[in-house]
Image (cartoon, rainbow, N blue to C red):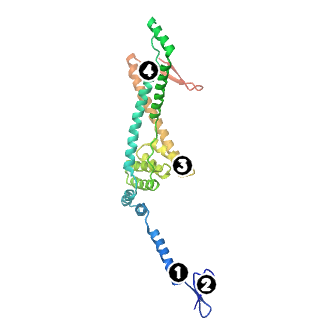
Amino acid sequence: DAIPSALNGEEDVIYEIGGGATAVVPPSKAQEQQPRQQQKVEEEEEESPISASEEFKRRGNDFFKRGDYLNAYDLYSDAIDACPGMKGEEIMTLKSDHELQEREKANQRYLRDSDRRRNKKPQPQSKITSSDEEQNAVNQDGGDGDKNDNNDDHEDDSNDDDDLTPSEFKIPTHKYGIQLAVYYSNRAACLLHECRYDEAIQDCEIAILLNPKYTKAYVRRMTAYEKTDQSEEALRDAKEALNLDPQNKEIRKHVNRLQKVEDERMEKLKEETMGKLKDLGNSILGNFGLSLDNFKAQQDPSTGSYNISFQN
């Protein structure tokens, strides 16, 4: 026989011959638990909006680990397409529109500053006539209105200045921006292996716009920049990655290496520029029977300036 449990009253205990005991859930209690269990299963089976994208990413990772970069690229692309919200193309269009607006604002600032400089130039003084004296007297007696008008003009200028202030591009809030950044960055890794560096740079740029603190995206774009002989941009990304992850020894090595590459590039550029300037100087001095060899430049160690002397 079943004897009600003294512990919680929800189960019956059947004492068996030999000293064993079995807990049995009464039929009424079992029926009550079934709907709760079914609801829990349904909640677990309910898919999130990016579950499809995450599955594509997982499969893409498997192909990437096996070195099948083309199939991995396709799966990361599927993950991007399945992700809700705006995609990279729309983000880059917004960025392009913003840059166009910034160039227009810069042009308007230039025109505004040019007008202000012209207005500050001293006007030539002319002989004061009696009519000018009368006008000055009128201005002194009732000039408050004019002063107020001038103040209004200055207030308008201040408002114009606010409208022309440079601004940094920021994308609208993306609910799944962090995940979408991973899909683009992973696809960029495939592009690097396929030597499609320009496309990799763009995918990394999208990833960074979506998640400005995404270290891997900076490192991958650094690699693409270096492969396309853009050492200045590569060094900039390496430094930003190190700023995000200061303890990363590999990134620090990249910074030190790229700094040397950039220093060598600048030194070579300086030598080329000096050579071109020397050729230009010789072409001009040649008209007078001279050359730059007739001049000696000696640097003053105390000031860093150069003294130039003529030599026959």
| Mark 2 lies on residue | 5
Q: Earlier in the sequence, mark 4 or mark 1?
A: 1
Residue at image coords 51%, 23%: 297
Q: Residues within 10 Å of mark 2 (few under 14, many from 20)?
A: some
| Mark 1 lies on residue | 29
**Residue 18 x %, y %:** 61, 93
Q: How many marks?
A: 4
Q: CA distance from mark 4 to mark 1?
A: 91 Å
Q: Secondary structure at mark 4?
A: helix
Is 205 placed above or below 265 here? below
Q: Earlier in the sequence, mark 3 or mark 1?
A: 1
Q: CA distance from mark 2 to mark 4?
A: 98 Å
Q: Earlier in the sequence, mark 4 or mark 3?
A: 4
| Mark 4 lies on residue | 118
Q: Which mark is residue 244?
A: 3
Q: Nearer the viewer, residue 121 or 7?
A: 7
